Image: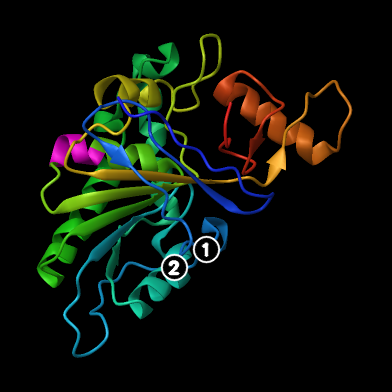
Amino acid sequence: ARRPRIIIPGPGMMQGAQLHGHPGGSASVRSSWLPRAARMRSYSQSTNSAAGNRPTRGVLILPGLGNNAQDYLALSQLLQSRGFVTATAPVQRQDWGRNAAALTDGAWWRGKLQPRPAVDWYLNHVNTAMQELKREVDAPITMLTHSAGGWLGRVFLRDFGTEGVDRFVSLGSPHQPPPMGGIDQTRGILTWVSQEVPGAWHDTIDYTTVTGRFIKGSALTGPGPALAKFAGAGYQQVCGSSEVWGDFIALTHG
């Protein structure tokens, strides 16, 4: 299997890291063109590239937890200005309330929840945008995912297929389940994903994951500013340690 490769830039910059797992999958760092995900604005739209130029790649954008398609407008426009054809899964902010339906599933309370049918609504939005993008462009497709869109995108590739997709890029996405004793905030879904499609699973796809090195966490009972303590509490649940670097939600390394 390939060894993970991590680049540690200065605080506030972007970094890339290989996904662990399948020996057939590969990953490389291609982060120079990516602005900070938190500043993105977007909407669900598929647009032709510059007139007269045949597009060489489509990009499918998957929104993160609590985001809607409109939050990625600037990202979509930036990619279009560089000749890509883009489409964004038409997720609306209120759609995330559908996840509450999983509360009626005993697996949620046991922390053993599987993604389907809990997140079928999201996967169907992704499939709608994917089919529109394929009709728009006859070229390879990059799935560009943000936050929870990273592991949701991995579920999509497993259940809807990889046809047409040759690159998978995630921005600030947690890909590993929490350590034993930690709280899986996905109530078991991330653990399931890591078992079913671990790491760079599909050998026909290049995987890249990008995270921000924004703030180092600190223990709640130790010294440090409140912001670092708040970040550290989240990092603790993700990797078992509060004193690591991350983007405030997803950590850079454990």
Question: Who's the residue at 14% across and 70% down the image?
Answer: 137
Locate residue 14 relative to residue 100 in the image: left or right.
right
Dot 2: what SS? helix
The image quadrant that residue 111 belongs to is top left
Of the pair 75 and 107, the residue shown nearer to us:
75
- Residue 51 x, y percent position in the rendering: 22, 90
Q: Which residue is mark 2?
A: 75
Dot 1: what SS? loop
Residue 250 visible? The answer is yes
Question: Who's the residue at 44% across and 26% down the image?
Answer: 176
- Residue 190 x, y percent position in the rendering: 39, 26
Q: Is residue 50 above or below residue 115?
A: below
The part of the chain drawn in magenta is 156-160
Q: Is residue 179 above or below residue 64?
A: above
Residue 65 visible? The answer is no
- Residue 212 x, y percent position in the rendering: 58, 47
Of the pair 222 and 125, the residue shown nearer to us:
222
For marks 2 and 1, the one nearer the N-term is: 1
Question: Who's the residue at 32% across and 67% down the image?
Answer: 44
Question: Who's the residue at 53% across and 47% down the image?
Answer: 15
Q: Which residue is mark 1?
A: 35
